[in-house]
Amino acid sequence: MKNLEPNKNCIKCIRLSNFRKENILKYPSYFNNPVSSFGSISSELLIVGLAPGIHGANKTGRPFTGDYAGILLYNTLIKFKFATGNYLPESSDNLNLKNCRITNAVKCVPPKNKPEMKEIKNCRMYLKKEIYCMKNLKIILSLGTVAHNSIINCFDLKLKDYKFSHGKYHIINKKIKLINSYHCSRYNTNTKRLSKKMFEENFKKIISYM
Ligand code: URA
């Protein structure tokens, strides 16, 4: 599919492109490129995260892989049969996604894990194309408000009519529902904003909406 992912040397975001160059020098063994989505484009479920973590997805080249957040995410996907195999913090594990695709609102690692508004906007065209190309898409799970807001913008809807709220589902159109979850980050799980049980509840809902 043409232009579904940014090219390797994408310079749409100068700050992120400079950060990538710094990381290539600092961590030469890392992937250090925009991280492509993982899972089949014909899936019914799309999970949207924030951005690759510097020593996780930016290292391994697979969303959430090697990131702390990936432990809860991938183990939950295995539990709810959206993945088979075993998750390891490296892309050479034997994990396969089933009827599920994972992407990020921003494809390049941002400094301090915080993409700027203009970077989220620059990268939105890839998310928009991806959603458009997912012809069987039924459910989008947004991990955090950045992902949620970017998804709402992809559909040209008004944020004031679609407020992020953990566990809530929004009807986007006749085919697609959006479910909100707090991001499964180390910060959210350590501060108990998000528990394993709360995260799993979302997947129970996803299955019941499919
Ligand atoms: N790793 C990712 O790929 N995305 C996130 O949102 C967090 C960690």
Image: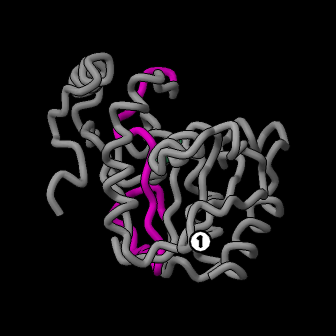
**Residue 130 in which image quadrant:** bottom left
Please name the amino acid that badge 1 sits on: Leu
Magenta span covers which residues?
88-112
The percent position of residue 102, horizontal first and vertical second, equals 45, 60
According to the picture, the residue beneath numbered tag 1 turns out to be 77
What secondary structure is the magenta-colored segment mainly? loop
Image height of 73 relative to 156, above or below: below
The percent position of residue 157, horizontal first and vertical second, equals 55, 46
Residue drawn at x 59%, y 60% as measured from the top left: 172
Q: Quadrant of the N terminus?
A: bottom left
**Residue 120 in which image quadrant:** top left
Q: Nearer the viewer, residue 129 or 182?
A: 129
**Residue 29 in which image quadrant:** top left
Residue drawn at x 82%, y 42% as measured from the top left: 193
Residue drawn at x 43%, y 76% as measured from the top left: 43
The percent position of residue 81, horizontal first and vertical second, equals 59, 82
Q: Is residue 155 left or right of residue 189?
A: left
